[in-house]
Image: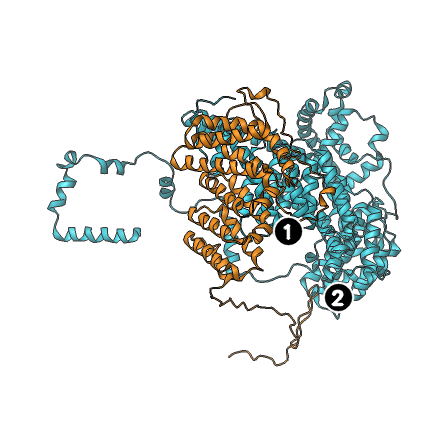
Chain colours: A cyan, B orange
Amino acid sequence: MGKRSRTAVQPTNIALLQNLIRKDPQSYIEEFRLQQQHYLSLKTIFFQNPRTPTGHEEFAELVGFITQMCSCFPKETVEFPNEICQLLTENYDGLNADVAEKLVHSIQMLRNKDIISNEIYLNTLFPVLVSTESKQLRTQVYVSIIQMVKSVNEGAKNQKVNRMLQALLFNLLEDAESNGLWATKITRELWRRGIWDDGRTVEIMSQAALHPDTKIASSGIRFFLGGDKEREDTLAEDSDDELDLAAIQHKMKVNKKSNRRKAQFDIAARTVKKKRGVGKDQTHLNFSAIHLLHDPQGFAEKLFSKHLQNNQKSVARLTLAQKIDCLNLVSRLVGTHKLTVLGLYSYFLKFLTPKQSDVTQFMAACAQSSHDLVPPDVLQPVIRKIADEFVSEGVAAEVAAAGINTIREIVARAPLSIEEPLLHDLIAYKGSKSKPVVTAARGLIQLFRTVDPSMLPAKERGKTATIALRAGETQQAKYGEEKVGSIEGIELLRQWKESNPDAELDEDKNWEVDSDMSDVSDEGWIEVGSDNEIEISDSDDENDESKNKKNAESNTDSMDTTETDQKPSIEATEILTPADFAKLDELKAEYGIRKAMNQSNEEIIDALNLTGVPKYKQNKEERLQHVKEGRTDREFGSHKRHHMEKPHSTTNKQKARKKNFVMMIHKREVQGKARKSLRDKQRLLRAHSERQKKKK
Amino acid sequence: MAKKVKDFEKQKLKVGKSKPLKSNATSTSFGTKSLVIQSQNKGHDLSSFLALARHYHAPTRRQAVGNISGIIHLHEQEIGEILETVCPLILDEDHQVRIAVAGFLGNLPAASLQSHIKLILVHIHASMTHITPAIRADSTQFLQVLMKHCPEQFVRVGFTSTLALYFPLLGWNLQGNSQSSSVSSTLALGKLASKARTLHINTLNKLIQLGTASDEAQVDILFHLDSEKFMIPTINPFEEGSQITEDSEARKEALRIYYKPLINGLEIVQKEGGEIGRASSKILTYLQAEFDIKHTNNMNSAVIRPKETA
């Protein structure tokens, strides 16, 4: 290759040479060869004594240089990537810290340029991460592995790399000797960033939670308890710092146009697009970890028997905090998936005494683990125990409140697990002197008014529940009973149809909806519905009024009950059209029925709430804060000042000040100044100086 | 009136909170601190000189090397340790320090030079390929010292590798047929540069002569007499680790691999004329005599045949 017209420069340092080679690789090939030779001899020197305090800077610099040159001279540097990988895998603990850092950095750079494949990259760095003694190296490798997985999964997921890393992590957990904590750390981080969100990831963590080492086990357990929340938080943060594309666009319009600015805008637009793409992908598969478990029943049983039941001698001893975490997880699993782990409830009995430390946590776990498929005779002893230990005259008020609140939480999930006499006893606490106890007891009454009023003493049932009971509408649920053969939320549809009977006139239209999907049909329906609603509601009121004349007291609830008796179910009498189903979906979303359904089992019980809210006097800052909260919408202070702060044109005063003096000199207000009496002048001067002081 | 403080107040237990500590509870936590006593030794012994040899101030380093050289005869046992500190100074950025190191090596007893020749050679090789031109220029001075004091051991261990490094040093192309393409060598003009190149050519001349001289006279004490029977000399200059050439035959074999590019480079230098041209023509005639080849301008078609040495 002949020389270019560019001026030849003699390189005297590595950075300069690197720059020169970048511009014109072929002219400087001999210099590159020289440095390659130098690298080889320095390598020999360095590996005679890898921990040497001197000489490593130069070696590290050369490694960086040749790494950079790999793209310029691919033929000359074929063996270099393998060489540095080998160097690192063989000597990572004996190496000087700087050189090790440089090697990792170079390997990372080569992977970014696709010279080293992802597989070799992982196989080189992963063993270093797991077994090196140097903290600095460990953090660097950890960060670079996370970074790599992140970049590989941008856009579409790279399942090959994910599988490979997951297999490595599984192996790490299976081998009891190795440092399994890294498996949990990496998985947790990738989950937190929303990069890994599938069943295999959760499988790694469930394996970690069952690990014999307590540290790993508790790390796995904590993942299931808090991992999802972490992920939500980070995703929310990410969406906050998005580039403001509109602002940049505006700048483009206003500022001078240049190629550089255009390029900047293009880059910004691309990053925003990329980010949005990723975000969409993440929300698409946003299941919580507990829902992705393959075998929740098996997992819960194993967790319970391995970490909590003390029948094995060789079991790893968890600390109390770890035990509570584990219990929390087991109970949440049981509650969410409605599992049956019968040993759990008798296990709780041991801990449910007021003197047990952190007893509120145990109580919360106990409440979480109860659901309607637990046999009542298993839960009854637990409730009995809580009532005996916590709710009696001899204990402190907050203890009694905690007891009643816990019982309420349990009973809300499994209404059959309490007997009537005990319930009556607990309700009697509504006459207590302590506020939290009264609130707790009232909560219990309120709960049973909706769940099963027949259990309450007659005077506590309330008007609505009494009427419903007399009409025979409410029946006690039996154990294991579930509503069958009904469509979710069909009641809503029935009510809606009753309120707008005109809506179903055009039957043929309703069937056509099928083909062109909900969007168009929805719009049509909403229009019709809203029109009719007004008319029909009027007529309903009239009906009500006429009936009200006969019955002095009757409310809408009783109306509904009579109507349900006449028409048992809408699906039995009518054929539902696709339009009906579309409407049903809309209604369901409207009433948040899904949310209400999930709430009973997935709701996390906060241990702090069980003792009731402590009442104390607010201090001054808190009071002031309340006051300030009320002021947010209004502006205080002078109107003039607010006006002056806004951008505005020159005021009359400013104009007067700027006016040419020659034009003003003959005016009376100017000439009069000289004729003023001494006293007046003094008065004016004093007023001015006063004003100046006030300004400061 | 101030409220009276009770003597034995009972601490209340709170539900869900851990038990408060008893008043007579003993804290068993402890911390440690270590005492570091810095060395007070400031005597002018070997260890302090070795430390000074790593000093940031160049004249101090030079002085330290000189001092070590003065007391070397007292520390025959620690020669390995000393060399480990001094050898990196072959790559020192200061000219004076490098000259001092060359003096130091010349002052060493031949036996210790021989036993540590690998360590020294590796550093010289690094200096031959160093990016700073001044360090490269001085590199062959150290070679000169080795050739003077322990020629046999030097050519045995370092003949091939050293020869190979002359090509990038002089900016010659190892691939052969094309012209010199190194930018630095074409730009290296001036008095100092030409002086350095003359030195390079002269040492190359000496290297070739030492390497190809028949070694019947020398008595090899290092090896068993029959060791030759079990050794298979294999040469591959492009691979590390196989650079040891046992006898002049093996070295000639190695030289044959580099013959063509070597002649190519020397011819270019010969055309420059002057002292350097004369030196290179001397090498050329020697090589031709040795290898018995009619030297033609068209070297590409030259048949290389080593002289029969029976």
Q: Quadrant of residue A525?
A: top right
Residue B20 at x, y percent in the picture: 66, 70
Residue A603 in the image, given as x and y percentages of width and height: 73, 48
Q: What residue sits right under mark 2 in the picture?
A: A356
What mark, if any, has residue A560 been given in the picture? none
Residue at 11% x, 45% y is A674
Give the x, y percent position of residue A7.
42, 26
What's the chain of the residue with tag 1?
A
Relative to the observer, which residue lies in front, A572 or A628?
Answer: A628
What kind of element bears circle 1?
loop
Q: Are marks 2 and 1 in contact (CB under 8 Å)?
A: no
Position of B148 relative to A577 (above/below): below
Q: Position of residue A311 (x, y in %)?
A: 86, 61
Image point 54% across, 61% down: which residue? B75
Q: Is residue A271 visible?
A: yes
Residue at 57% in and 59% down: B78
Q: Chain of mark 2?
A: A
**Do the residues marked 2 and 1 share a common chain?**
yes
**Is residue A104 among what the camera can see?**
no
- N-terminal of the pair, mark 2 or mark 1, is 1
* Up-down relation of residue A405 to residue B238 (above or below): below
Label 2 crowd (10 A; few <14 / some 14-19 / many >=20): some
Q: Which of the pair A7/A472 is nearer the observer?
A: A7
- Give the amino acid at mark 1: Gly
Tell me if B265 is positioned left or right of A392 in this view.
left
The answer to whether A304 is drawn above or below residue B147 in the figure is below
Residue at which label 1 appears: A94
Using the rendered view, name the quadrant where residue B66 is placed: bottom left
> What is the number of callouts on the image?
2
Residue type at mark 2?
Gln
Q: Residues within 10 Å of mark 1 (few under 14, many from 20)?
A: some
